[in-house]
Amino acid sequence: FELLPRDEAEEFLLNLSAYEQGELLAELPVVERRLWMRSLAPDDAADLLQEATSQQRDELLALLDEATRREVKALLAYAEDEAGGLMSTRYARVRPDMTVEEALRYLRRQSRERAELIYYAYVLDSEQRLLGVVSFRNLFAGNGETLVRELMHTDLVTIPEETDQEEVSQIFARHDLIAIP
């Protein structure tokens, strides 16, 4: 693993089960373990931690930066086969009163800070409640002065956090969506 080029090592690690990832990381020096733990998305890190012993869990959590540690701990509160345990806490968000131009500028900054693939931006109010969703296609095609609220879709498919993963899968298939809040 240590002899692989970085991109191949990353692909290899991501293709392992959570248990196998934990076994591999346990064999690495602490500095390398920290680097690889921090390269995992919070939902992947949570999966890995669910497979770890309580002692390993504490050691691995300590390797994460504070913000990611909070995200991972929140995910650990859910069973791994429920929607809450499968979700990603990193998503693109905009406000309804932003113009398209402001939203695009803000989303560019978010995409640099977060290495997640994003297709939709969730429209949230000031209290972080979901109001709607807007696709990047609509933002790119929109007039720069148009408000996000004029482009967002409010007829949303959502999934409660405690929904079983099989039902989650059926909802994704039924609605042909790539992300569901």
Image (cartoon, grey):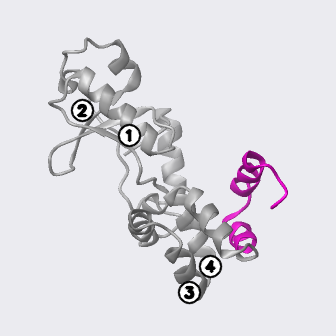
Circles 3 and 2 in contact, beta carbons < 8 Å: no
Screen quadrant of the N terminus: bottom right
Three-letter amino acid code at disc 4? Ala
Seen in the image, is 38 located left or right of residue 10? left
User: Tag on residue 110?
Assistant: 1
Q: What stretch is highlighted in magenta?
A: 1-25
Q: Name the residue under label 3.
A: 54
Could you tell me which residue is drawn at 18 percent across and 22 percent down? 147
Three-letter amino acid code at disc 1? Gln
Could you tell me which residue is drawn at 71 percent across and 76 percent down? 26
Q: Mark 2 points at which residue?
A: 154
In this rendering, the label closer to the viewer, 4 or 2? 4
In this rendering, the label closer to the viewer, 1 or 3? 1
- Residue 124 x, y percent position in the rendering: 22, 42
Q: Mark 4 points at which residue?
A: 52
Real-space CA distance between mark 4 and mark 2, rounded to the nearest whole angstrom: 40 Å
Q: How many labels does the image show?
A: 4
In the image, is residue 8 part of the stretch drawn in magenta?
A: yes
Earlier in the chain: of badge 4 and badge 2, it is 4
Element under disc 2: loop
Real-space CA distance between mark 4 and mark 3, rounded to the nearest whole angstrom: 6 Å
Seen in the image, is 156 located left or right of residue 79? left
